[in-house]
Image (tube, grey):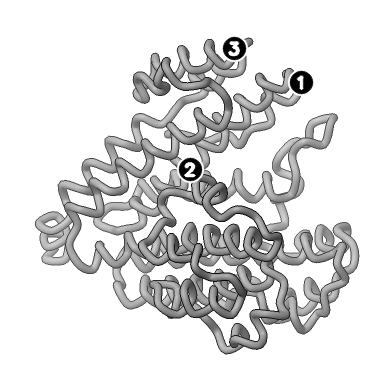
Amino acid sequence: MSNSLNFNMENGYLEGLVRGFKNSLLNQSDYLNLTECETLSDLVLNIQNTDYGPLHNTEEKLDVESIEKCLRDRIVIEYNYIRENSMEPLSTFLEYMRYEHMIDNVALLMTGLINHRDIKKLMPMCHPLGLFDQLEAIEVASTIEELYNVILIDTPLSNFVAENLTRSAIHNTDVEIQRSFLFKAYMDDFYRFCKKVGGTTAEVMCKLLSFQADRRIIAITVNSLQINMESKLRLKLYPQCGTLCSVTRSALAICTEEDQVHTILNHNMSYANVLSSIERDTDNLITLEDRLLTLEAKMHVDSFLHQFHYGIFYSYLKLKELECRNIVWIAECIAQRQIDKINAYIPIPIH
């Protein structure tokens, strides 16, 4: 009782606010209206009739990129308000939610640096939740080693630079592998932090992070099939906080075909129904990643059934980002006249 009282005193307002935000997520009727739009102007007009309200400045060029930017800006506004009104340890928890976007931004700029791209043109492509002061200093980095000092050491990401990412190793390691090392360290550290918070937060968040770790293990396995990655390296990239046992991890690490991955998952009780529970459309648009995302969306919705925990902040952000992805997918289909693929978005089972 005292824990509930303390939670309400410190975080009750923000919890109620986020539960209200969750009720503003698009429902199936809203998605149906969006998929029937024929132009981007119609799409923006239909979005305006939801809780989003006016979305796009009529003076700006209307394209998919501008729509995505407006959607992301809305997410950032909500996040910043919650962050500015939070107290410890919620403030630290909210910062952890940003770190994965920081990692993605660093990976994007590292790739641009290697390919001699203009960094100033890449900065607008970075996710706004993953921006931090030192990121702009990348312009002074002319080599990967300088980038190591500027970005990975003197930033919040320094805690996730594993021993595998030394100055010499980072120069000879693929950017996606570097990103995977950072993400593994981030996930495991976030998991430990949630365990330390304890209570319902630990119960809900550890389950969510374990599933995300499993999804990442599967994604690393599938994505590395075409590059003949060594099994030892795969194992090093796998987060430790997942539910997949060591035998399953070892089996996935030596897979050479995606069918082998499916077979292993079908023998795992946690994921035995993943491949069969979601009906595959005739064009095979629903990938394994989509199936796992659909299951994850349901888990995030279910986290709102619990009270007095930080998990709803994490789940709301994930659901909002998934909603943003769905709208962008619909917008891309409209812009490219791929109407037959417009319904291949990830459904969010709002209660």
Instruction: Give the number of the disc on residue 323.
Output: none
Q: Which mark is residue 321?
A: 2
Q: Residue at x 38, y 41 (%)?
A: 75
Q: Which residue occupies 50% across, 28% down?
A: 67
Q: Position of residue 104 (x, y in %)?
A: 55, 59
**Viewport quadrant of the C terminus:** top left
Residue 245 location (% of width, % of height): 66, 77
- Label 2 and label 1: CA atoms lie apart by 24 Å
Q: Earlier in the sequence, mark 3 or mark 2?
A: 3
- Amino acid on which disc 2 is placed: Glu
Which amino acid, mark 3? Cys
Q: Position of residue 293 (x, y in %)?
A: 61, 47
- Label located before the other in sequence (2 or 1): 2
Please state which amino acid type lies under the numbered disc 1.
Answer: Asp
- Structural crowding at the residue carrying mark 2, measured as other residues with C-alpha within 10 Å and reported as few (<14), some (14–19) or many (≥20): some
Packing grade of label 1 (10 A; few <14, some 14-19, many >=20) is few
Name the residue carrying label 3: 37
Task: Identify the residue shown where x is 52% and y is 51%.
Answer: 120
The residue that appears at 72% across and 22% down in the rendered structure is 336
Mark 3 → mark 2, Cα distance in angstroms: 21 Å
Q: Secondary structure at mark 2?
A: helix
Image quarter of residue 167 = bottom right
Q: Secondary structure at mark 3?
A: loop
Q: Quadrant of residue 214?
A: bottom right
Which residue carries the number 1 mark?
340
